[in-house]
Amino acid sequence: KKIAAAKDILCIDLFAPSKAAYAKANAAGKYLTINGCHLSDEGYKALAPALDEALFGARPASYKGDLAKIE
């Protein structure tokens, strides 16, 4: 974080969200990695919202566009 701030570049802290996601998954007897290191599909699903919000901000309450037109 300090180096990113000094260089004026984006730094996304996934430690806190991943710690919470792992605790929740472990309490349910589930794992978020395929080998203790690399995320599984469930791991990506758990951390994607935190990454998305860090990169693009909070999700809007509603969308103005017609998503059906995007193909």
Image (cartoon, rainbow, N blue to C red):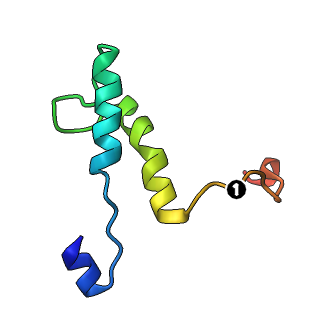
Q: Quadrant of residue 5?
A: bottom left
Q: Which residue corresponds to the image point at 17% horizontal and 38% vertical from the top-left?
A: 37
Horizontal arrangement in the rendering, residue 45 relative to residue 18 (left or right): right
List the single residue furthest toward the left.
Answer: 36
Residue 30 visible from this viewpoint:
no
Which element carries disc 1, helix, strand or loop?
A: loop
Q: Residue 10 at what x, y percent from top left?
A: 36, 73
Residue 45 visible from this viewpoint:
yes
| Location of residue 31 with respect to 62 vertically, above or below | above
Q: Amino acid at mark 1?
A: Pro
Closer to the camera in the image, 23 or 11? 23
| Location of residue 1 with respect to 23 vertically, above or below | below
Closer to the camera in the image, 68 or 39? 39
Q: Quadrant of residue 63?
A: bottom right
Q: Residue 60 at what x, y percent from top left?
A: 70, 56
| Location of residue 41 with respect to 28 vertically, above or below | below
Horizontal arrangement in the rendering, residue 57 relative to residue 7 (left or right): right
Q: Which residue corresponds to the image point at 43% horizontal and 54% vertical from the top-left?
A: 51
Q: Residue 62 at what x, y percent from top left?
A: 78, 52
Q: Which residue corresponds to the image point at 31% horizontal and 17% vertical from the top-left?
A: 27
The residue singled out by tag 1 in the image is: 60
